[in-house]
């Protein structure tokens, strides 16, 4: 391997690392506030990538069905529990998004317009998922929540296959072309991805560190009873966590859709790598999760150079030593706490 | 004096195990009411049931407003705030953040929250010194102060205090209980559960003796303190 190749691989490593980092921190956030391992986060990524691709082709994306049906069921449940205002909102907002998409899909909206529309369609899916699948089970054991998460994942993958078909799609990069820095070609889209991820990660850090809303999410994660005692409703915290995860998942999906071909089931693989990074952080620490994600991006990128057929095998085989290492740290911490 | 909290015919417990049987009690507005009794009498259960952490049957009313069926958060928004025996602080967050979150329900009133935070630091200078420290790094007494100060940030009308003196050195116990007595001047009513009966009866206006999930004696705190049975069992 010469320096040029190493540098190109590093560029790839950082690009995928950035995406994995976004996913890893959303998984940490959702798990620590709700104890849910958000396996379907990968589906939000692929659904938003496919939605964007569909809009680019001038089609009405099939994701609208999911938004419409989901919104309808949530509105129905709200109406049944007597929350008329919520029911109206859950009818009106998805309705408006669907109407706007149907009106605008045939026109050239420009990249910004298409991305805004994709975000409006896909981010609410995460909240709908929480409302329908997880909130009614808020007090269930973690294992039950995990199985429900698996079920939602299978459901969304199936839906994705149904409306987008088995073919892969790719979108146009936001910034096509390359620039040469110190004799090394840099893909502009890679810079867009790394830059966006950096901005989002900083925004999340500020949200959790500086705002009362962000601190309320941390408080729920830190001590759920304590949080209730100061008036933080666990369901509200869960909903905010899912909304943020939805936004991050959508943006991630839109970012990678120009770097790699996205199929109906691509999200799972991407989500799994984000999950590995989250596990490295013990599902608790945001900076560790981000660091783990960059590490996984790196291993994947260099593994694909040396043994591309084994790239995923190498990455996933790593989970074993990582889990052993985590287990050692966690049991040491437990011992210290008991002392 | 009208009653801020009125409880009658209250039954509560854990699952199938009923701990409180047909309890009736009152907390008059602006008073400190002590609940004393042996371990396992149901004192903590009573406070948890009042705060909404445990299911309960029977009448509970705050200023005439029924509390039964309301969530912890809803009761808090009506002014019922619990400081549990286990404190339930946010250990991996700073003292200042713990306090700020105590005022979560007033989050739209930023100026008021900032004022409340200043007031809390003025009242507990120790917490001001340690404002940037993690709550988990505090000593037992400081944690108790923080739990009390955090509950105050919600601007309660009724404070439910579970064993504020637990695990504290005698000197700090006196300080904490003086703080509790001081709440009365701010118009806050307190329902105080305390192992340290002597100290509790000293600051309380009224007292109830809770034994085996039933109230066995009640009255003005000094009368209860004088009763031979209480003197023998709890004041030794």
Image (cartoon, coloured by chain):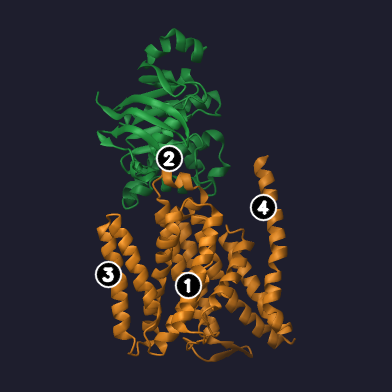
Do tag 3 and tag 2 residues touch (Cβ < 8 Å)?
no
Return the residue nearer the eye: A203 or A277: A277
Q: Name the subunit of mark 4.
A: A
Q: Is residue A225 left or right of residue B63?
A: right
Q: Quadrant of the C terminus of chain A?
A: top right
Q: Look at discs 1 and 2 and give the one toward the viewer.
A: 1
Whole-number angstrom distance, CA of label 1 to CA of label 2: 36 Å
Residue under pointer 2: B53
- Residue at the limit of the structure toward the top, as seen here: B228
Chain A pictured colour? orange
Q: Which residue is mark 4?
A: A330
Chain bearing tag 1 is: A
Badge 1 marks a residue whose secondary structure is helix
Task: Identify the residue position indicated by label 1 in the image.
Answer: A156
Decide which of tag 4 and tag 1 comes sooner along the chain: 1
Q: Secondary structure at mark 4?
A: helix
Q: CA distance from mark 1 to mark 3?
A: 23 Å
Q: Say if mark 4 contacts mark 2, CB within 8 Å.
A: no
Colour green maps to chain: B
The chain letter for the residue carrying disc 2 is B
Taking depth in this image into account, of A279 and A38 the one nearest to the observer is A38
Separation of marks 4 and 2 at Cα, in angstroms: 30 Å
Q: Is residue A170 left or right of residue A80?
A: right
Whether the residues at callouts 1 and 2 have beta carbons within 8 Å, the answer is no
Q: Is residue A303 left or right of residue A57?
A: right
Which residue matches tag 3? A92
Q: Is residue B89 above or below residue A130?
A: above
* Residue A11 at x, y percent in the picture: 62, 81
């Amino acid at each position: 391997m010469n320096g040029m190749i190493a540098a190109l691989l590093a560029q790839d490593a950082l690009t995928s690392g950035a995406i994995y980092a976004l996913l890893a921190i959303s998984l940490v956030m959702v798990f620590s506030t709700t104890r849910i391992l958000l396996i379907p986060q990968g589906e939000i990524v692929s659904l938003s990538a496919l939605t964007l691709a569909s809009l680019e082709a001038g089609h009405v994306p099939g994701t609208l069905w999911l938004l419409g049906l989901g919104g309808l069921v949530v509105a129905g449940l709200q109406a049944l529990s007597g929350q008329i205002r919520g029911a109206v909102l859950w009818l009106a907002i998805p309705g408006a998004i669907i109407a706007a998409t149907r009106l605008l899909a045939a026109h050239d909206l420009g990249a910004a317009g298409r991305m805004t529309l994709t975000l409006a369609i896909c981010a609410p899916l995460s909240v709908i998922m929480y409302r329908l699948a997880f909130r009614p089970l808020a007090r269930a054991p973690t294992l039950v929540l995990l199985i429900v998460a698996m079920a939602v994942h299978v459901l969304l993958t199936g839906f994705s296959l149904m409306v987008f078909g088995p073919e892969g799609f790719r979108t146009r990069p936001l910034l096509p072309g390359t620039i040469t820095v110190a004799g090394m070609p840099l893909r502009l889209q890679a810079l867009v991805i790394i830059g966006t991820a950096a901005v989002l990660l900083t925004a999340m850090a500020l949200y959790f560190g500086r705002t009362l809303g962000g601190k309320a999410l941390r408080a729920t994660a830190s001590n759920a009873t304590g949080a209730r005692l100061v008036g933080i409703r666990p369901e509200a915290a869960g909903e905010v966590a899912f909304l943020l995860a939805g936004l991050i998942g959508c943006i991630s999906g839109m970012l990678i859709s120009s770097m790699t071909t996205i199929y109906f089931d691509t999200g799972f693989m991407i989500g799994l790598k984000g999950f590995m990074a989250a596990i490295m952080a013990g599902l608790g620490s945001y900076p560790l999760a981000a660091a783990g994600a960059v590490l996984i991006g790196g291993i994947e990128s260099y593994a694909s150079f040396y043994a591309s057929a084994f790239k995923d095998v190498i990455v996933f085989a790593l989970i074993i030593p990582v889990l052993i290492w985590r287990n050692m740290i966690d049991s040491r911490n437990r011992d210290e706490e008991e002392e | 004096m009208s009653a801020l909290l009125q409880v009658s015919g209250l039954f509560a417990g854990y699952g199938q195990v009923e701990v409180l049987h047909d309890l009736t009690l009152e907390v008059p507005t602006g008073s400190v009411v002590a609940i004393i009794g042996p371990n396992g009498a149901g004192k903590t259960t009573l406070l948890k049931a009042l705060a909404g952490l445990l299911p309960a049957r029977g009448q509970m009313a705050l200023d005439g407003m029924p509390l039964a069926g309301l969530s912890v958060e809803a009761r808090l928004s009506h002014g019922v705030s619990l400081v549990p025996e286990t404190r339930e602080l946010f250990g991996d967050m700073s003292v200042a953040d713990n306090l700020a979150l105590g005022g979560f329900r007033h989050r739209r009133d930023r100026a008021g929250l900032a004022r409340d935070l200043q007031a809390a630091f003025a009242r507990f200078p120790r917490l001001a010194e340690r404002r940037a420290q993690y709550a988990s790094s505090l000593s037992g007494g400081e944690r108790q102060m923080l739990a009390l100060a955090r509950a105050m940030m919600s601007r309660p009308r009724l404070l439910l205090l579970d064993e504020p003196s637990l695990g504290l050195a005698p000197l700090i116990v006196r300080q904490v209980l003086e703080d509790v007595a001081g709440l009365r001047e701010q118009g806050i009513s307190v329902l105080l559960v305390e192992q340290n009966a002597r100290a509790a009866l000293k600051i309380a206006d009224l007292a109830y003796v809770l034994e085996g999930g039933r109230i066995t004696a009640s009255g003005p705190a000094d009368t209860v303190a004088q009763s031979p049975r209480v003197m023998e069992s709890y004041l030794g």
